[in-house]
Amino acid sequence: MGTGILTIDLDALAANWRDLARRSRGETGAVVKANGYGCGAAEVATRLAREGARRFFVATSEEGAALRGALGAGPEINVFSGHMAGDTALIRDHALTPMLNSPEQAARHRAALPGHPYGVQLDSGMNRLGMEAPDWAATRADLEAGPLTLVMSHLACADDPAHPMNAAQLRAFTAMSAGVTAPRSFAATGGILLGPDYHFDVTRPGVGIYGGQPFADARPVVRLSLPVVQVRDVAPGEIVGYSATFTADTPRRIATLSAGYADGLIRYMSNAAYLSAPHGKCRLAGRVSMDLLTVDVTDLPAVPDHLDILGPDQTVDQLAEVAGTIGYEILTSLGRRYQRLYLGA
C-alpha cells in the first residue's frame, strides 16, 4: 500500500463532544467546517447526530449542501459566511440557515427568500465577521420579526483565559444581544472552558471535538501511519534530501516514507518532527518533500512497515508545535491521498 493510513476514532470524537456538552449550559451543537476539520464532515456529523447534536455549523453554503446530503432532513445547518451572492438556491434547496453578517446580507436574504429561517452574527470586537452595533441597531427590529433562529458572536482570545479581550467581548455581546428572544451563541471550545458566563443558550465546540487544544482532557481522535517505501544505509559525510540540510556524522539508516507536503505534512517540520514505532521514536532527517519523508531509523531495533506521525505518542498539537503552527492547521491540511479508516462508524 503506497498511501498513508489516517485512522479516525469516532468513538473518541463522540466522547469529546459528550464531555464538552456536559460542561455546557444549554444546547450543544458542533462545528464541522473544513470537511470536519479534515476528519470527514459526513462521518463526523452523522455520528454526532446519533449522540444528540441537532445544530451543525459550516463555513460556506457549498459545505452546508454537502452536509445536508449526509444528514438528511431535520438537523439545523448554520452557515457562518451568511447569504453570499449566488447562494440563494443552495440555501433554499438544502434548508440551510445563513448567519447574516451585514445589512447587505440581510437585505439580500429577506428579498430572495422571504420566510426562510436565518441567524445573525454580531461583531463583539474581533473585527472579522458580523454586524457592528450601529448596523445591528438599525436592522434589529426588522430581523427580530423573524424567522430568526440564532444570534451569535465569536471570541478572539478564548484559548487564553486571562486575556482581557474575553471579558470585553462578553460585555459587548451581552449588551448587543440583550432582550433578544432567539437563542444566543457565543462559545466555541475555548469559550466553553471559560465557564458558564460565556455559554448562553447554544455552544458550538469545534477543535476540542477532534482532540485539539485548548481542550486538554480531549481523547486523541486521529492516527496517521505512513508506509515505509525503502530503507538505505548512509555513510558519514553523505547528505539526505533536498538542499543537503542533513549530513550523516556517523553511519545512519534512513527510511523513506510515502507522504509529504502535498499530504499536509508541511515543510517546516523538516529535520524536527518525530515519528513513532512500536519500540521507539525516530526523527525526520532532511527536508520534507512533496511526496516523501526521510527518517533516521538507526536506533530502532527493527524498521516496521509503517511509522506513525500522529497518534498516542504525538498529538496534533505536539506536531504543530514542532512545525511552528497550530493543531487546526495540521488537522485541516491532512491530504486526500490518505486511506481513511473509521473506528466506531
Image: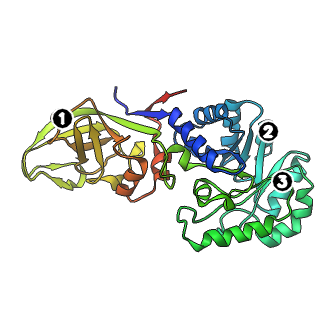
293 or 48, which lies in front? Answer: 48
Evaluate whether residue 83 shows in this view: no
The residue where tag 3 is placed is: 182
Question: Quadrant of residue 72 in the image?
Answer: top right
For the residue carrying disc 1, how many other residues have a C-alpha within 10 Å: few (<14), some (14-19), or many (20+)?
some
- Residue 101 tag number: none
Residue type highlighted by circle 1: Val
Find residue 33 and report its horizontal and vertical position in percent: 61, 45
Residue type indicated by callout 2: Ala
Q: From mark 3 to mark 1, how far is it between C-alphas? A: 61 Å
Mark 3–mark 1 CB contact (< 8 Å): no
Indicate the position of residue 8 as horizontal and vertical percent values: 48, 34
Few, some or many residues within 10 Å of mark 3 (<14, 14–19, 20+): some
How many angstroms separate mark 3 from mark 2 (CA)? 19 Å
At horizontal 68% and vertical 38% (from top left) the residue drawn is: 53
Looking at this view, is 91 or 118 the one in front?
118
Residue drawn where x is 86% and y is 63% of the image:
179
Image quadrant in which you'd find residue 7 = top left
Residue 317, position as x, y percentages in the image: 42, 52
**Residue denoted by label 1:** 231
Q: Is residue 44 above or below residue 187?
A: above
* In the image: residue 109, left or right of residue 324: right
Sequence order check, earlier mark of 3 and 1: 3
| Image quadrant where one finds the C terminus | top right
In 3D space, how far apart are the residues under numbered discs 1 and 2 (Cα atoms)?
53 Å
Specify the quadrant that holds the N terminus. Answer: top left
Q: Which mark is residue 95?
A: 2
Residue type beneath disc 3 = Ala
